[in-house]
Amino acid sequence: MAAACALTAAVTLLPLSHSSGDGDSDGSDTVAGQGVGRAVTAQRADTCDTPEASLTPSGAEGPAIEKIKERGKLIAGVDQNSFRWGYRNPATGDLEGFDIDLVRAVAESILGDPDKVIYRAIPTNQRILALQEEKVDVVVRTMTVNCTRLKDVAFSTAYFQAGQQVLAPKESPITGYDDSLAGKKVCTAKGSTAFDALVKKSYGADFKDRTVSNQLDCLVRLQLGEVDAVVTDNALAAGQAAQDPAVELKGEPFTQEYYGIATKLGSDDLVRRLNQVLVDYREGGDGSPWMQAYAKWLKDDLPGITKPPAPKYRDN
């Protein structure tokens, strides 16, 4: 475990940016099912019955798209510490992963070149602020769509379905998100849905003073024995378990959540373009860009997914 800890700690947060161009579900399905292959029209977002419902797709341009084109680069807020999703390859120094492939697809749609991206690594609790302060155009960082966040940012349709789950050492007596957490030290990221879940029901876990800015820091604390368990998205936890064979996912996912591409409120033209990108990204069955990215980055750690989550659209 010490070797894994050293590898994890060596990847640090970018202070500013990295430009690749300059060298710099259907709601009832389980995670394994990943939705169905057709769009579903949902109620208005302000009812928040279906927070993952978004604007209908369009390739039309508007002020947000024009701003990106004038700059000549898409500025994307990403993670560089989440194995398989957005992480820096230690051999090449390049950012790689499922989320990075999606960023490149967005850049290709808007700018005609997948390399025209400025990547800005941002911690979990700074994702919304980075959009509100216009430091980034989009956040593609395993960000769960929920009713609270819809008050602050806009989201695309869902591009992945996940669920909260417990990560702990294999020999741990912790069995999942249950009474086995009583009295245990549990780590979560600030501003995460995992923290919100523990606030609602902690099972007696000690967690409020054990938050971190970046979710991967929880794995480091777990490896150092500073905490007993981590609560996070199972999609992220699966990648962490792949990094460290001494830990494993415990129990079953206890929530159903959707990742979306986030952007600033009011950027309707950009949201619609993102949704058009995702329509194209999902198409093609097993040969679709989505399935190819899944096979490349996630299948080994999250087997059994047969299709992406179906998009849901608002009725206005």
Image (tube, helix red, strand yellow):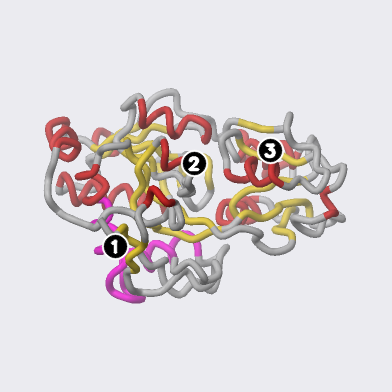
Point 52% across, 70% down: residue: 28
Residue 215: mark: none
Instruction: Report crowding for label 3: few under 14, some 14 to 19, many 20 or more residues within 10 A (C-alpha).
Output: many
Q: What residue sits right under mark 1 in the picture?
A: 281
Q: Nearer the viewer, residue 163 or 48?
A: 48
Q: Which residues are magenta?
A: 274-298
In the rendered image, which quarter is residue 312 located in?
bottom left
> Which residue is the site of mark 2?
148
Q: Is residue 218 magenta?
A: no
Query: Which percent across, then down, holds residue 161?
Result: 49, 61
Tell me the residue at 47%/39% (across/down).
80
**Residue 294 painted magenta:** yes
Q: How far apart, in angstroms, are the residues tagged by discs 3 and 2? A: 29 Å
Query: Which residue occupies the foreground of this view, 34 or 99?
Result: 34
Please report the residue visible at 36 percent of the width from the left and 47 percent of the height from the top: 155
- As drawn, is 7 to the left or to the right of 74? right
Secondary structure at numbered mark 3: helix
Real-space CA distance between mark 3 and mark 1, rounded to the nearest whole angstrom: 34 Å
The residue under the point 75% across, 53% down is 246
The reply, left or right, for residue 233 in relation to residue 156 is: right
Does 215 sit above or below residue 293? above
